[in-house]
């Protein structure tokens, strides 16, 4: 078969690919971020978002326990403090708690000082509850800023999972150092499949789970054939609903039936990649950030 993924790493125990059902447990951080003046009046939206930590996340944990797999959940610091019981349960069962901002801020809209404050507040919240500093970061809304990488390196993070620049892990570097990037893609996000919420100006048709799973399964098949990484961007209040959770069970069973799948946390995947690189067993591709230092001049502009 034609090899479509270049330079795949070797995976543990001869696995064909690495898989992580990585969730973003945003809860009502989105509500308070986008509607700071009248969030208390949006009861229906709040109930939909709090379904994530209260109902969906325990259901997802039962699925993971059934299959005896450990996965990663990225949690804003405010959510860690607001829903400590479910975050503590995740940590106690061996799942990774990753950093996901403080209130799901779009950090490329903040000052460098503001972004640094948000990063530290999230670190403090996770460390205080779990007793461990987070080692992984996923930028809320993918809004990676020109200074994000330097801030992560300065705070000792081991990997980032915000970008979409490859099909396998790669390195991102800046003047401050370099870090492992564990990429994903919008095709592995449950938002375009399931979310229809006027409050978030997202009104696409809701897909039935079997249609959505065709997308996720096809991406898995390609990763399996080529030796890539399959890392989802899912949300408990979205994919934790009963019909979608049941479809997730079927997807995991499908993956297991194919065989040669390494189910792991993102931290475990990053540690494996770090080991390969440090031992000289694999050389990843590297990209330097930011890509552009200033706007590119336009020779003509549209008429307004």
Image (cartoon, rainbow, N blue to C red):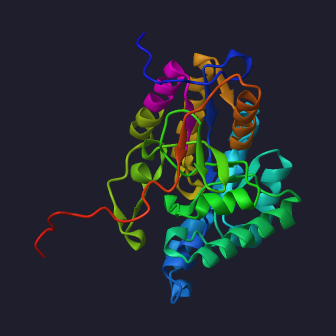
Q: Nearer the viewer, residue 255 or 12?
A: 12
Q: Nearer the viewer, residue 265 or 41?
A: 265
Asked if residue 50 is positioned above or below residue 96 in the image, the reply reads below
Dominant SS of magenta comes to helix
Q: Dividing the picture into quarters, in which one does residue 119 lie?
A: bottom right
Task: Answer whether residue 191 is visible to the viewer in this image.
Answer: yes
The residue depicted at 43 percent of the width and 52 percent of the height is 194
Asked if residue 51 is positioned above or below residue 95 in the image, the reply reads below
The residue depicted at 62 percent of the width and 46 percent of the height is 22
Q: Nearer the viewer, residue 40 or 189?
A: 189
The residue depicted at 43 percent of the width and 29 percent of the height is 218
Q: Residue furthest bottom?
A: 37
Asked if residue 159 is positioned above or below residue 129 in the image, the reply reads above
Q: Position of residue 226 (x, y in %)?
A: 50, 21
Q: Residue furthest right?
A: 131
Q: Dividing the picture into quarters, in which one does residue 292 lie?
A: bottom left
Q: Position of residue 138 (x, y in %)?
A: 61, 55
Count of labels in the image: 0
Asked if residue 214 is positioned above or below residue 292 in the image, the reply reads above
Task: Answer whether residue 99 is visible to the viewer in this image.
Answer: no
Q: Position of residue 19 (x, y in %)?
A: 62, 33
Is residue 23 on the magenta stretch?
no
Q: Is residue 173 left or right of residue 82?
A: left
Q: Which residues are magenta?
A: 217-232
Q: Nearer the viewer, residue 103 or 57?
A: 103
Q: Position of residue 280 (x, y in %)?
A: 72, 25
Quadrant where the N terminus is found in the figure: top left
């Amino acid at each position: 078969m034609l090899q479509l993924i270049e330079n795949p790493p070797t995976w543990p125990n001869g696995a064909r690919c690495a898989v992580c059902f990585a969730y973003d447990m945003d809860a009502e951080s989105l509500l308070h971020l986008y509607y700071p003046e009248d969030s208390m009046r949006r009861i229906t939206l709040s109930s939909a978002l709090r379904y994530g930590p209260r109902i969906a996340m325990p259901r997802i944990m039962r699925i993971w326990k059934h299959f005896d797999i450990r996965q990663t959940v990225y949690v804003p610091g405010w959510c860690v403090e607001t829903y400590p019981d479910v975050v503590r349960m995740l940590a106690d069962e061996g799942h990774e708690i990753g950093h996901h901002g403080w209130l799901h801020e779009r950090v490329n809209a903040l000052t460098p000082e503001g972004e640094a404050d948000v990063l530290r507040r999230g670190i403090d919240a996770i460390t205080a509850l779990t007793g461990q500093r987070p080692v992984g970061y996923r930028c809320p809304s993918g809004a990676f800023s020109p200074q994000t990488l330097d801030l992560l390196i300065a705070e000792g993070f081991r990997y980032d999972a915000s970008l979409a620049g490859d099909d396998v892990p790669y390195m991102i570097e800046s003047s401050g150092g370099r870090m492992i990037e564990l990429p994903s893609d919008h095709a592995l996000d449950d938002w375009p499949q399931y979310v229809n919420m006027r409050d978030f100006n997202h009104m696409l048709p809701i897909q039935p789970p079997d249609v959505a799973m065709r997308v996720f399964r096809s991406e898995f098949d390609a990763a399996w054939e080529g030796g890539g990484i399959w890392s989802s961007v899912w949300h408990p209040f979205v994919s934790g609903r009963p019909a979608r959770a049941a479809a997730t069970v079927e997807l995991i069973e499908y993956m297991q039936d194919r065989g040669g799948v390494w189910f792991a946390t993102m931290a475990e995947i990053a540690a494996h990649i770090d080991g390969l690189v440090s031992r000289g067993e694999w050389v990843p591709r590297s990209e330097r950030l930011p890509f552009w230092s200033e706007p590119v001049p336009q020779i003509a502009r549209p008429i307004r």
